[in-house]
Every structure is written in C-alpha cells, then in structure tokens.
Image (cartoon, coloured by chain):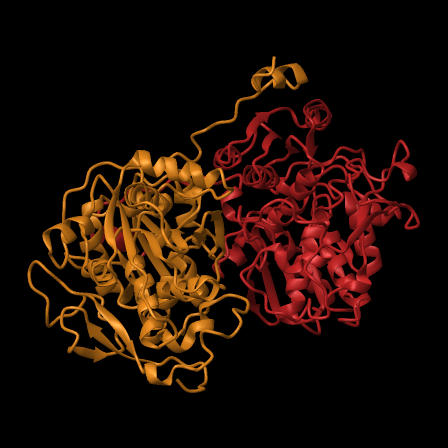
Chain colours: A red, B orange
Amino acid sequence: MTAHPAVSLARSQRSLGDPGLRYPLHPPLLRGCPRTATADMVYPVEVDYAYEDTPADLFTRPMGGGGLERWAPLLPPLDAPGLGEGGTALVPLGDGLWIKDESRNPTWSHKDRLNRVAVSAAVRVGAKGIAVASSGNHGASAAAYAARAGLRCVVLTSAGTPPAVASFLQAYGADVFAVPQEARWPLLAEIGDRLGYHTVSNLTRTHTGHPFGPEGYKTIAYEIHGELGVPAAVFVPTGYGELLFGVWKGFRELRDLGVTDTVPPVFGCEPATGGPLAAAIRTRAPAAVIEVGTTGAYAIDCAAGGNRAVRAVRDSGGDALLVTDEELTRARDELAGQGVWAELSAAAGLAGFRQWAAREGDVDGPVVCVSTSSGFKDLGVGGTPLQPIEPTWEAVSRALGRA
Amino acid sequence: MTAHPAVSLARSQRSLGDPGLRYPLHPPLLRGCPRTATADMVYPVEVDYAYEDTPADLFTRPMGGGGLERWAPLLPPLDAPGLGEGGTALVPLGDGLWIKDESRNPTWSHKDRLNRVAVSAAVRVGAKGIAVASSGNHGASAAAYAARAGLRCVVLTSAGTPPAVASFLQAYGADVFAVPQEARWPLLAEIGDRLGYHTVSNLTRTHTGHPFGPEGYKTIAYEIHGELGVPAAVFVPTGYGELLFGVWKGFRELRDLGVTDTVPPVFGCEPATGGPLAAAIRTRAPAAVIEVGTTGAYAIDCAAGGNRAVRAVRDSGGDALLVTDEELTRARDELAGQGVWAELSAAAGLAGFRQWAAREGDVDGPVVCVSTSSGFKDLGVGGTPLQPIEPTWEAVSRALGRA
C-alpha cells in the first residue's frame, strides 16, 4: 500500500458467475453478467480495484465529518454530490452487543450509501435521470440523491405504501407512481430504456441490482472495523442481500489488504414468511426465487434472491436465519426500550442474533447488528392516535394506574 | 489549558439576571434564578466551568464516533447513557452556504443534544422519571433518553399532533397524554412534584427551560468550528431560543478560551405569526410574552420568549428575523431540492438567511444555517396519498407530460 491521492482505484467490473470474466468499469452492467446468464440464473458483477495502490493510511486516518469521500480510493468515482452519508453511530446495548444505527443517514436509512454510489454512476454515464422501483427507503433515497445531482427521478412504488412513507417518497420532487407489485420491474426497464434514465434497482429474474450498490454498503464494515476491530459476527436485515454482501466484502477487503487477519461470519436475517437466501443455502443453489407470505417487514419482503447474499454467507461461514414477525416485533421493542426506534424490517438483525444466540450460546467478542432504518417508515405509523385526557393530576394519576 | 482526564469541569449554575449570583451545580434550577425572579420576568441560569482546566487538545482531537462524550470536560456530567448524539453532517449548498443537518441525531432532531444532558441531570439527582411538555421532537427525544436510562417518562402533548408524530411520541414506551395547550405547564409542574419526576421543559412565565439544555446545544458550535472555523454568521430556527443561546455560547467559549478570535453574529429566525424574540429586541426588554397567530411551523410557535435568545442576539451583534410561512415553505423546498427533507420549522434558519441576504447582500465567509429536524415530523405528512396509475409506458409517459 502506498500514499496516493483520494481518487478512485476502481478499474473493472468482475462477474460473480466467473471471476475470470471482467468488463470495463463503465457503463455499469445493470442486468448483471451477460456472459454467464441463463434463463433461470443471472449473476451480478462486482467492482474490482487496483488494491495495490490503496493509501497506507486509509484505515487509520480520522473519520472526519462523514461522507463516503472518506473512502474514495476503494469506491467507484463519486461524481454525484454527497449528503454526508455514512459515519453512523454504533450504539452499545451491553454484553458486547452493538447496533449500527443506519437511520442516521441523510434520508434515514442505509440506502443512502448505495445511492451516493449508484447516482454517481448515472452522472458519469450522462444519464438523463434516475428510475427506481421501491417500497420506500430506496426510492426516497434515490430521489434525494437525484435531486441533489440535478437529475429527474421516477419512482415506482406500491399502492399499499404507508401514508408517511408516501409523503417521504414525494418529498424530493420525484415523479412517484403506484403500480401493482408484479408490474414494477418490466415498467422500470421500459422507463429506463425510453427516457435514458439510469435504473438503480433490479431488472433481472434472480437479483443482480446495481453493480456498484454494495460498494457503498461495504463502508459499514470499514466503519465497524475503525471502532471495534473485527467483530465476532455481524447480523444483517436481508431482502435481496446487497447490504449483506457489501458488509462482507468490506471485511474481506480489510483482510486481503492485510489490515486484519479474519473475516467475521455474516448472518442474513430474512422474514420467515419468505427467505430466498435460506432457500438457496438449503438447496445449495447459487440463488433462489420463492413464494412469499405476508409480513410486516415489507422492506425486506423479497421473492427473488441473488447470488451476492449466498456468496457472503457461504464464504464467511455465516448462515441464513428466518425470523418471524413475532421475533421482529420483540427485537423492535427491545431497540425502542434502548432509545432506538427502528422500522420492523430494520430490527431483523437483532431478531436474528437473539434467535441464534438462544441456540448457540455465548459469543466470544463483540457482535454487531445492523439496524437499517427509522421507525417512521413502518406500516403502523400514524395509526396510534393520541388519547385526550382531562388536564388534571387526578386524571393523569388514574391513567398511570396510581389512583 | 492543561492536559486532563475527560471528566466534567462544570462547577456551578450562574444567573443570567445577575452574573455575580452563583448556585451549586445540582440540583438544576428548573424554575430559573430564584433571587432575580419577579412576577413578570424570570431569568434562566447557565452552567459555569473550571475553564482553566480545559484539556489542551479538546478542540483538535479527532471527532471519533459521535456522542457528546467527545466534549465531556465542558459539559455537565453525562450520567445518562448516550445514543451517539451529535457529530451531525454539514451539507454544502454552494456559495459558502452550509446546512448543519440535525436530523442526523438519534431521534432525528437537535433535541437529543439537550436530552442527553438533561436526562443525565435527572439520573444524577436520583429522579424517579422524566416529565416533558412537547409538540413532538422534544417529547420523543426525552422519551428515548429516559427509556435508555431506565426511567419512566410522561409526555404532555396536544391533540393536534400529526399522526406520524403521535406514533413517534409513543414509540419509546412513555405515557403520552394529549391535553389543551394552556393546561400543559401547570400539569407538568404538578406531575413533576407529585411523582418526583425531573421536568425537562419550561415551568416559568418567561422561558427558562432546563438549565443544562443549552450546554448540549453548544456542541453544535464546537462541531462547526472543527470543520469551518468561525463562520461569518449562523442562522437558527428559534422558538424559545435555547438552541440559539447554546450555539452562541459555544462560540463564545471558543473565543474566551483563546481558540478563536471572534464570535459570529447569531440570527434567531422566528415565525412571523409570533416572534417573542423580535418583540424583546424591538422593545429592549430582557424577554417578551406575546400573542401568536397560526403557522405551520408548530415546533417553533412560541408565545413565551426568554432571556437566553435576547442575550445571544445582542451580545453577538446578530438579529431576530421574522419569516413568513411562505418564506419557510420556499426554504423547505430549496432544501428538499438539495436532498435534505426538513420539517417546516427546521427550514427557518435558511429562510432567515435568504431574507437577510436579500437585504444585506453578499457575506464574506461561510454561513451556516441549522436545520433542526426531519420532514417526517411535519403537519402535512401522511396527507399526500399516492396516485395509482395504469402500469404501462403510455400512462407513465402521459403523466410525465411527454404524450
């Protein structure tokens, strides 16, 4: 590792289906690796870097004021302006357990790390706008970064989006349309093609997503390492598995660069009503597409899995954990009782850890659960009206059960 | 300044009505300075420190992972556990203008800085719980810090609280009661007295609030200084003026410690439908209580002003600016167009700066506008339903005005 200016060392896209297959860095392969794709299975690509030129002090210099610029050498070029994303708090829950609170990002979810990088790619390739299909966080985040970059944005979402999230999606000036779930992706592809908009969500049967997205997420691993070193395990809310892969990749890079000795096991925590990652792990498939049931964890309620999550779990020695809505609710309540109001989906990391720890027993070393987003995005928000009360001590006392 | 461990150097409470009057640090004087109080005017107290023992590197050491611990020597004792509050992003808007985005705190507003410090005081004095009167952010923040400290919390709020904020207030397990606005404060005092709960909002005719609250806020000045040095001016959304005073005090301390040469002018930005600070400045009063009209900026819609804001404006050479709802809306839209979704009240700083700059012309040096909170807390949230659309390119194209 040598001293170097803070320019991107990204040099190519590499297939997850065949690591020998490389493509130029731009344009991003929004439909995964073309050469390994079959009718049933599409592999994503990831970004490769000139790692040998990594600045010697990249992982030891002070964090600074936040913003992915801090990690620019090991990210694709950051052409879109930032919002100070990343640098989120690690909140201790005691007994060596830590919550990485991603609700502290510019649009209050982890998706800002992805969108800083993905919208940068759109700027780099001269796209006329951004198109995204999303149930909430991803769409609002894409809209925010598009607005900041001076790009139009189309968001395709569902009619069932909670009212507060509907306001959130529309806050940044995007064109937001509610369409049936199954119609989203073909329409997204058509909008991208016809308008020359860069798509920042998935377009393929098994999930490939934006090739650069997990690069944004891997900075979570860098940040955790900066505060705790290598944790004993990391538990991650998992829908398509982009976040899980990103966190794993960050730790893998730290080890490959000789900064650390080991990669922690990463655990993908999915709603028990679905679980494409668990299905792929169980059947030893590169990815699975499944039927999903009904869960309140709408942000991670995914039928299509992808190869990223499978790679992260298998290579790290982690696992796929299925958490019930009851376990999710318990974890969300535990977080709220510690002052962290998380979306139900965001509590999946802690729910997975509690389930796993009940089975496996004590852990040697710190454990990190990622909490992806704020409670404001949940289905029930706005549905707990305040009860008026007579403004007297007697009435309050009665209500508190002290009468 | 000498090297020293990170313990609090706080040593007394000092009256703003008569700086010669000092009181022990604990218990916090929740009803202001008793010896200078009259029927019409109550002065707050502030915290004094053994400044001569300030660690030499306090303002130069790296920021670290956030959390007010970073500034422990110049804060009251931090007995309550934290949530990684502070360390918020400074987002550049161009032309030397910066937004200090306080929505990046644990409960997504600046109030977390106050509550870390105020709930710590409650823990220190052995209070049985926390009581707070609040239209939203303050109440939820107090509830979060109370929960984390293992204390019960009673929140008195208004029936007109937006639905998403009602969920927010109830998220952390507090007992939340909706009572008429005018009944809040006497009831709060009674709850505090009868239950032995520590009150973290105001109890007096002219505003005094929690004596330690602005100490939390002053860390905003420390952080701004760490990134930009001394800005040319700071514009602050102003209700009771605790935040304004805190920001000013932080810069004043930096100058008094010899770290900087000057204190920037601070501008209190109030809704034009009220403006107790503007009234006090205009009449050269130590504080004013006024009639208020109707504004969407409910978080800073205050009838009772206090001496803190008056002191900050007068001593810094700043001013009180009255911003209309139209100016607030324009500022909020400008922020959203840059990827920052702020509550209407939170946009008051930028609204004030735009009004002031139109009158005064160019500024020499960076200007910081504090944005206090996220758009999720606004009155209109949940009231902009999504429009379903036929899921075809033709329908989308028509909706985009391209047909």
B203 lies left or right of A170: left
Q: Position of residue A359 (x, y in %)?
A: 72, 63
Q: Is residue A290 left or right of residue A98?
A: right
Viewer-proximal residue, A368 or B57? B57
Is residue A99 visible from the viewing direction of this image? yes
Q: Nearer the viewer, residue B109 or A4?
A: A4
Q: Quadrant of the N terminus of chain B?
A: bottom left
Most distant residue in the left direction: B39
Q: Residue at x 34, y 71 (%)?
A: B261
Q: How many marks?
A: 0
Kindly indicate the quadrant of the structure image that contains residue B272: top left
Residue at x 65% of width, y 55% of height: A349
The quadrant of the picture occupied by the C terminus of chain B is top right
Residue A347 in the image: above or below residue B9? above
Could you tell me which residue is drawn at 32 percent across and 67 percent down?
A: B262
Residue A9 image position (x, y, % from top left):
76, 56
Res A73 → quadrant: bottom right
Residue sitting at x 42%, y 62%: B145
Above or below, B310 relative to B349? below
